[in-house]
Image: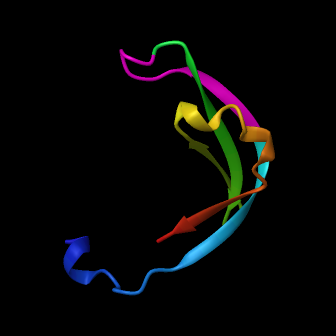
Amino acid sequence: MNYHFANLKSKKESYKIVERTFIRGGTKYRIGEEQPVFTINYKGIKKDLVFKHQYFDKMNQYKIVELET
């Protein structure tokens, strides 16, 4: 239903990363690999975003998350 009523325009918004942490896990092929978790303030609510393990080494370099909706 969302497909038929969706707006054709996309919107990009940037959010400052307020916290960083990581989790271990993944699929059965990636067990034990650290995945970065970035916390953003989305409309007054803290949201955790989990990224793939290849971003773990540089996770402290990232300052913002850009979301396209």
Q: Nearer the viewer, residue 9 or 62?
A: 62
Structure colour scheme? rainbow
Residue found 61% across the figure and 24% down from its top: 23
Q: What residue appears at the point 36 percent right and 15 percent down from the top-left corner? A: 28
Residue at x-position 79% and y-position 40%: 60
- Observer-nearest of 61 and 13: 61
For residue 26, which quarter of the picture?
A: top left
Question: Where does the image place residue 7, in percent across and percent down from the top left?
Answer: 35, 85
Looking at the image, residue 54 sits to the left or right of residue 38; the answer is left
Residue 22 magenta-drawn? yes
Point out the stretch of residues depicted in magenta: 20-30
Q: Position of residue 59 (x, y in %)?
A: 72, 39
Q: Position of residue 22 (x, y in %)?
A: 67, 28
Position of residue 14 in the picture relative to residue 24 (left or right):
right
Q: Is residue 68 magenta?
A: no
Q: Quadrant of residue 27?
A: top left
